Image: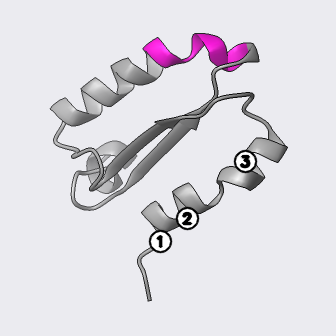
Amino acid sequence: MSLVAERLRPGKAKLYFDHGNRTLDAHYAPYQALADRLLVQAGFTPGKDLLSLRFEGEHNEPAWRSQLAHPLSFLLPPR
């Protein structure tokens, strides 16, 4: 069984994506929108097991540092 079929099932996996709107990421939004639509069609629910965010600015290490709370709070369950 493939990784997608075995591990990346709605309700079993959580998927987080983010991108900026400058440099190379300026061209990324339509592709992420397509991926989001396909994942929703596959059964993922935005905000529950799928989160896709767009940030102003570049997508680089300083930006990741300032945005780290987003994926951590979404992907890791509270204790």
Name the image quarter holding residue 30: top left
Looking at the rendered structure, the kind of residue marked 3 is: Trp
Looking at the rendered structure, the kind of residue marked 1 is: Leu
* Above-or-below relation of 9 to 18: below
Q: Secondary structure at mark 1?
A: loop
Of the image marks 2 and 3, the number of the one nearer the N terminus: 3
Q: Residue at x 21, y 35 (%)?
A: 40
Q: Residue at x 37, y 56 (%)?
A: 14
Give the numbered dot on residue 44: none
Which residue position is annotated with label 2?
A: 72
Q: Residue at x 50, y 18 (%)?
A: 29
Q: Position of residue 48 (x, y in %)?
A: 27, 56
**Residue 70 lies in the magenta stretch:** no
Looking at the rendered structure, the kind of residue marked 2 is: Leu
- How many marks can you see? 3
Give the numbered dot on residue 76: 1
Label 2 to label 1: alpha-carbon separation: 6 Å
Q: Residue at x 64, y 13 (%)?
A: 26
User: Is residue 59 shown left or right of residue 20?
Assistant: right
Is 13 in front, or is 40? 40
Q: Position of residue 33 (x, y in %)?
A: 38, 21
Magenta-drawn stretch, dominant element (helix, strand or loop):
helix
Callout 3 touching callout 1 (CB < 8 Å): no
Of the image marks 3 and 1, the number of the one nearer the N terminus: 3
Label 3 to label 1: alpha-carbon separation: 17 Å
Callout 2 touching callout 1 (CB < 8 Å): yes
Residue with the most extreme front position: 56
- Magenta residue span: 24-30
Q: Position of residue 75 (x, y in %)?
A: 46, 63
Give the numbered dot on residue 64: 3
